[in-house]
Image (spheres, rainbow, N blue to C red):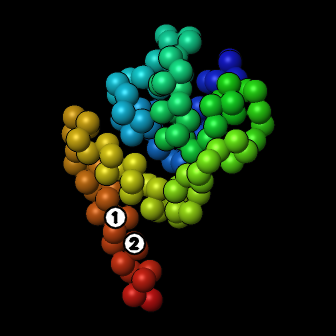
Amino acid sequence: MSTLITRIEERIQSLKISATEASLSAGLNPNAIGDILRGKTKSPRAQSLYAIATTLQCDTDYLLGKSDIIYSTAGNTHTPAYIFLSDEEIELIIAFRSLKKHKNPNHALNTIRKLLETSESTSNS
């Protein structure tokens, strides 16, 4: 198994999202990441790899095995907003982004509802 496949799988599991949700959030074909994981796509385009890395909250160098640092701000002129977001906020953004691309948006809507209910109940405590 390639480093790219292993690291994409690790990030997807860590973020508790599916390959399809990650693909949609990255603005790619719903099967894009699944095709990489199955070995159908062996060398994704740089633009696709960047979108996947952004969605999976890591560097492209990490996904490619060139670095063991998941996200490095070295050389970047800005810090990505997701570094300051909670896991729940990140899930909410991913679910929201997938709404317009999802064939069945009810799953994404239900995720958003649950996250909003959870955040409301914790803020009222």
Question: Residue reaching furthest bottom?
Answer: 125
Q: Could you tell me residue 124's position as x and y percent?
A: 39, 87
Residue bearing mark 2 = 118
Callout 1 amino acid: Lys
Q: Is residue 107 above or below residue 44?
A: below
Q: Quadrant of the N terminus?
A: top right
For the residue labelled by badge 1, is the local secondary structure a helix, a strand or a loop?
Answer: helix
21 is higher (above) or lower (below) than 106: above
Residue 51 in the figure: left or right of residue 67: left
Q: Give the residue at the far front of this rendering.
A: 77
Find residue 120 and report its horizontal and vertical position in percent: 36, 78
Point 26% across, 45% down: residue: 99
Q: Is residue 34 visible?
A: no
Camera-side residue of 77 and 87: 77
Q: Position of residue 116 (x, y in %)?
A: 34, 68
Label 2, residues with CA under 10 Å away: few <14, some 14-19, many ≥20: few
Residue found at x 73% / y 26%:
65
Residue 54 in view here = yes
| Distance CA(mark 2)–CA(mark 1) | 6 Å
User: Could you tell me the amino acid type at mark 2?
Assistant: Thr
Say which quarter of the image contains residue 122.
bottom left
The quarter in which the C terminus is drawn is: bottom left
Q: Position of residue 88 (x, y in %)?
A: 47, 62
Task: Name the residue that disc number 1 marks.
Answer: 114
